[in-house]
Image: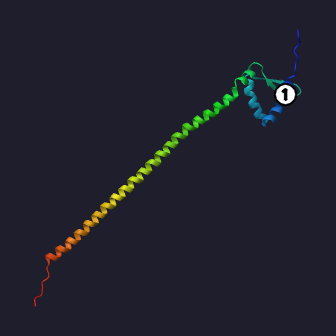
Amino acid sequence: MSMAHVIPAELVGLSFKHIEKELNINSYQRELMLSELDKSEEIIFYHLEERGCYIDQKNGFAALSNRKYINQHWSIILDWIKNFVQIVIPVLALIVAYISFTSKMNSIKMQYDKELQDVKNIILEQKDRLEELEKQNQIFSNPKKIDSL
């Protein structure tokens, strides 16, 4: 029967100080992160010279091999993108519709203004012709007497 060589936990695991240093986090952030791993029973805590933890052989290695947290990370990012797109696309569509509507209204207004100016010009022409006809009518209705010699 062979005896398994026992390796102390501090040699296979990471102390809390080492985790904080490697991840550049404070103790609050470390506790938050490790609480998720502890809840899922993926790490085992030890308290020897220092406090620390190491990966659980059953659940911890399964999470590593299944890329559990990498997949969760990408799922969060994709959900955020999906939510962003679901908000941004309708807003952009509304902006495009507003721009199109105002552009169309400006085009209609310009066309209306042009037609109105054409009508005003026609009215002015008719007014001028009417005045000319009235002048001619006055000339024919009041002929000047020609002086005879």
Residue 147 falls left or right of residue 30: left
For residue 41, say whether it is visible. Answer: no
**Residue 51 in picture, x, y percent from top left:** 84, 28
Circle 1: is it few (<14), some (14-19), or many (20+) Cα within 10 Å? some
Residue at 65 percent of width and 31 percent of height: 74
Q: Give above or below for 123 relative to 90.
A: below
Residue at 70 percent of width and 28 percent of height: 69
Residue 82 falls left or right of residue 16: left
Residue 6 falls left or right of residue 73: right
Residue that extends furthest to the top in the rendered view of this protein = 1
Q: How many marks?
A: 1
**Residue 79 in picture, x, y percent from top left:** 61, 33
Residue that extends furthest to the left in the rendered view of this protein = 148
Q: Quadrant of residue 34?
A: top right
Residue at 75 percent of width and 24 percent of height: 38
Q: Quadrant of residue 62?
A: top right
Q: Give above or below for 118 relative to 54.
A: below
Residue at 82 percent of width and 31 percent of height: 16
- In which quadrant is the C terminus drawn? bottom left
**Residue 129 in picture, x, y percent from top left:** 23, 68
**Residue 97 in picture, x, y percent from top left:** 46, 45
Residue 29 falls left or right of residue 81: right
- In which quadrant is the N terminus drawn? top right
Determine the secondary structure under disc 1.
Answer: strand
Colour option used: rainbow
Q: What residue is shown with label 1?
A: 51
For residue 90, say whether it is visible. Answer: yes
Q: Amino acid at mark 1?
A: Arg
